C-alpha cells in the first residue's frame, strides 16, 4: 500500500500506525474491526474532506483490484475495507501530516466538521504509562466497563459512552488513587460511584504533555480533555441527556454490584451480575 500511495502525487504516505482498542490492548475478545492511522503528507488539512476520501477510495480500489468495489467503502472520516469470510473490517483513518517528525497531525472530526490536532504515538504512550504502573489491571478494568457499555446499549440504543472517554476517566481515577484496580469488583464500584456522586461535573485534565492552564474554557456538559491536545474536549458534543443517561446507568450498575456482594447465595449474586454484564454472564 505504501509504495502505491507514494507513487501518486496526491497521497504521500509517511507512516501506517495501528491505533484504537487493539493497539491499546483494550479490545474485547469479539473484536471485528481494526483501526489503522494513515499519516499522509498534507502541509494543510484538505478543505474538501469528502472529495479527499473519495480520491483515497478510488486509489485503494485500484490498489486492491482483486476486491469487489463494495468491500472498500467511505465512512464519515475513514475508509473501511471489509474482508469477506472473516467478518473483519479495517478502518483506515487519514491523518494530515506536515512531516514535523513528532507525529503531530490532524484528524477529521465528523461531529464538528473540523480537523483536530492529535498524536496517536503520544496517546499510546499515555496508555502505556498507566499499564506499566498498574500491570494488566488498568486495561482489564477498561475491558469490563466496555462490556457493561455494550450491554447497556442493547437496552438503550441512544446510550452514549465512548471507549476513549472511559479510558480517560479510569486514568484520572488511577492517577489520583481513587480506584482500586487490582480488585476488579471494587474497581467497578469505584468507577460507578464516581459518576453517581456527580463527578462528571469536574474538569478532567492530564499534565503528561501540557499544563492544566492550557485547556480551553468551555461550558460543555462533560469536560474531559484530550491528553495530547488541550483544545479538544473529547466529550464536547455530549448533551445533558447523555450525561444523565450515563449517571442513571451507573447508578443501576452500582446498585447491582453492591447487591451482588451482599447476596446470600451464588445464584442470587449471578442474577445481579447479569444486570451489569448481561444474561450470558455465568458467574
Image (tube, grey):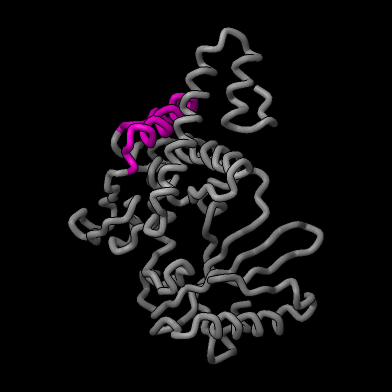
The boundaries of the magenta stretch are 177-200
Quarter of the rendering containing residue 7: bottom right
* Relative to 180, residue 94 above or below: below
Tell me which residue sits at (48%, 20%) in the image. 258
Q: Work out which quarter of the rendered image holds the C terminus and state it.
A: top right
Tell me which residue sits at (38%, 33%) in the image. 196
Viewer can see residue 219: yes
Residue 151 image offset from top left, x and y in percent: 61, 39
Q: Work out which quarter of the rendered image holds the N terminus and state it.
A: bottom right
Q: Verify whether residue 196 appears in magenta.
A: yes
Identify which residue, 8 or 108, lies in the foreground: 108
Q: Verify whether residue 73 appears in magenta.
A: no
* Relative to 36, residue 41 above or below: below
Residue 39 image offset from top left, x and y in percent: 49, 74
* Relative to 202, residue 53 above or below: below
Q: How many marks?
A: 0
Amino acid at each position: 500500500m505504501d509504495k502505491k500511495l507514494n507513487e501518486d502525487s496526491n497521497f504521500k504516505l509517511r507512516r501506517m500506525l495501528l491505533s484504537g482498542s487493539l493497539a491499546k490492548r483494550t479490545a474485547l475478545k469479539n473484536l471485528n474491526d481494526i483501526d489503522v492511522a494513515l499519516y499522509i503528507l498534507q502541509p494543510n488539512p484538505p478543505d474538501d474532506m469528502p472529495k479527499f476520501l473519495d480520491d483515497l477510495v478510488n486509489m485503494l480500489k485500484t490498489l486492491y483490484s482483486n476486491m469487489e468495489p463494495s468491500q472498500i467503502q467511505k465512512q464519515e472520516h475513514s475508509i473501511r475495507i471489509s474482508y469477506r469470510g472473516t467478518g473483519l473490517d479495517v478502518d483506515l483513518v487519514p491523518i494530515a501530516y506536515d512531516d514535523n517528525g513528532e507525529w503531530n497531525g490532524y484528524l477529521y472530526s465528523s461531529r464538528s466538521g473540523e480537523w483536530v490536532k492529535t498524536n496517536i504515538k503520544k496517546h499510546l504512550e499515555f496508555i502505556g504509562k498507566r499499564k506499566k504502573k498498574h500491570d494488566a489491571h488498568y486495561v482489564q478494568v477498561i475491558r469490563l466497563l466496555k462490556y457493561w457499555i455494550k450491554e447497556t446499549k442493547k437496552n438503550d440504543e441512544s446510550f452514549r459512552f465512548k471507549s476513549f472517554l472511559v479510558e480517560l476517566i479510569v486514568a484520572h481515577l488511577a492517577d489520583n488513587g481513587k480506584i482500586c484496580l487490582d480488585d476488579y469488583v471494587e474497581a467497578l464500584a469505584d468507577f460507578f460511584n464516581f459518576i453517581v456522586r456527580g463527578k462528571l461535573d469536574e474538569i478532567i485534565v492530564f499534565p503528561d504533555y501540557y499544563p492544566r492552564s492550557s485547556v480551553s474554557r468551555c461550558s460543555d456538559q462533560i469536560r474531559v480533555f484530550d491528553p495530547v491536545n488541550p483544545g479538544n474536549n473529547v466529550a464536547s458534543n455530549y448533551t445533558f441527556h447523555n450525561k444523565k443517561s450515563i449517571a442513571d446507568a451507573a447508578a443501576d450498575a452500582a446498585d447491582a454490584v453492591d447487591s451482588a456482594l451482599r447476596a446470600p447465595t451464588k445464584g442470587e449474586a449471578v442474577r445481579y451480575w447479569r444486570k451489569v454484564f448481561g444474561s450470558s454472564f455465568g458467574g
